């Protein structure tokens, strides 16, 4: 059987979710998305045009029939702003699946967790399928799952930092307790970071800057696709335990001296 994951009632083969910001133009965005193999593409409603057909529109380059377009509320600093942005995307016909971001600080871009929970509760009541961006905080993840979110999206590191997973232990706790998909969001810098996330058992990885900011975004998109696939296979295969001392690769028991 295909190794797929389910998100908000739909099944996906690719466990790599990519963003659409910071590219030179929409044409490069399209090429990178295609190279990544992603089936879910996230779009900042307040920064990239997907609602005005009279202007250059990202959806002219990314077919909504081929990709799940995931609008996000990037750039929102209050629950009210985020709720309004999500409603705008749905009214434009993008759908009810939304990545919820409520930022608490302009320098770190860490989420405002209380405001995120507040906005999530409202959007869930209104029929949205909410994917919230949060700190690597198991308690916040639990509260958001209890609020009815379709997944939880803990950061690996600050947005755009490229630092990789800073606290794998908290991510493991979130994975152990969660009954919804766990998607690493923010902080991935290179292919090995994506592989580590998948080896931990995460359901998917979302990234933007790591691909768009690379010297060769198209090649990096392909590298990320392969890394996610490799990390997932390694998780399913089950790694050997770590040991302090060596163990011979070839057994010597029963060998005649």
Image (cartoon, grey):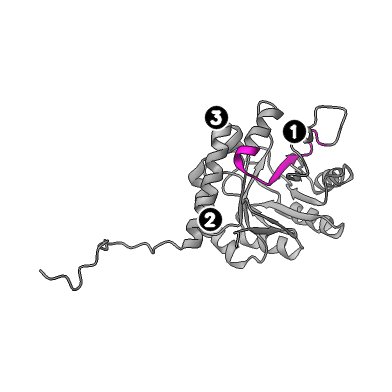
Element at label 2: helix
Is there a contact, CB below 8 Å, between mark 1 and mark 2?
no
Of all residues, the one furthest to the left in this rendering is 257
For the residue pair 153 and 25, the one nearer the viewer reads as 25
Q: Quadrant of the N terminus?
A: bottom right
For label 1, the SS is: loop
Mark earlier in primary sequence (3, 1)? 1
The residue that label 2 is drawn on is 232
Taking the image as shown, residue 233 lies to the left or right of residue 186, namely left
Question: Is residue 166 something that shows in the picture?
Answer: no
Answer with mark 3 or mark 2, whichever residue precedes in sequence.
Answer: 3
Give the total number of marks visible in the rendering.
Answer: 3
Mark 2 packing: few (<14 Cα in 10 Å), some, or many (20+)? many
Q: Which residue is mark 3?
A: 216
- Measure how far apart labels 3 and 2 are at the Cα level: 24 Å
Residue 212: image quadrant is top right
Q: Decide whether residue 49 is among the magenta residues.
A: yes
Using the image, determine if residue 145 lies above or below residue 184. Answer: below
Q: Is residue 89 magenta?
A: no
Which residue is found at the position 60% from the left and 54% from the top?
A: 136
Question: Magenta span covers which residues?
Answer: 34-50
Crowd around label 3: few <14 · some 14–19 · many ≥20 (10 Å): few
Closer-to-camera residue (12/161): 12
Relative placement, left or right, of 252 versus 145 is left
Q: Position of residue 255 (x, y in %)?
A: 16, 70
Q: Position of residue 118 (x, y in %)?
A: 79, 56
Q: Is residue 134 above or below residue 85?
A: below
Horizontal side, residue 70 vs residue 250: left or right: right
Label number found at residue 61? 1
Real-space Cα separation, disc 3 to disc 1, in angstroms: 20 Å
């Amino acid at each position: 059987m295909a190794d797929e994951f389910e998100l908000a009632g739909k099944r996906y083969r690719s466990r790599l979710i990519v963003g659409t910001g910071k590219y030179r133009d929409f044409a490069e965005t399209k090429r990178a998305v295609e190279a990544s193999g992603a089936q879910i593409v996230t779009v900042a409603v307040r920064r990239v045009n997907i609602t005005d057909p009279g202007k250059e529109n990202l959806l002219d380059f990314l077919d909504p029939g081929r990709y799940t377009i995931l609008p996000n509320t990037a750039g929102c600093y209050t629950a009210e702003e985020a709720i309004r942005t999500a409603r705008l995307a749905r009214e434009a016909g993008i759908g009810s699946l939304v990545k919820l971001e409520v930022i608490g600080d302009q320098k770190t871009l860490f989420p405002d967790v209380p405001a995120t929970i507040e906005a999530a509760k409202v959007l869930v009541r209104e029929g949205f399928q909410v994917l919230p961006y949060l700190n690597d905080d198991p308690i916040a993840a639990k509260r958001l799952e209890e609020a009815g979110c379709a997944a939880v999206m803990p950061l690996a590191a600050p947005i755009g930092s490229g630092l990789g997973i800073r606290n794998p232990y908290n991510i493991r706790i979130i994975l152990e307790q969660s009954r919804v998909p766990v998607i690493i969001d923010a902080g991935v810098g290179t292919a090995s970071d994506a592989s580590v996330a998948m080896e931990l058992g995460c359901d998917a990885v979302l990234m933007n800057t790591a691909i768009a900011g690379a010297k060769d975004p198209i090649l990096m998109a392909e590298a990320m696709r392969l890394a996610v696939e490799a990390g997932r296979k390694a998780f399913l295969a089950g790694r050997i335990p770590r040991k302090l001392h060596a163990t011979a690769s070839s057994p010597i028991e029963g060998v005649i001296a």
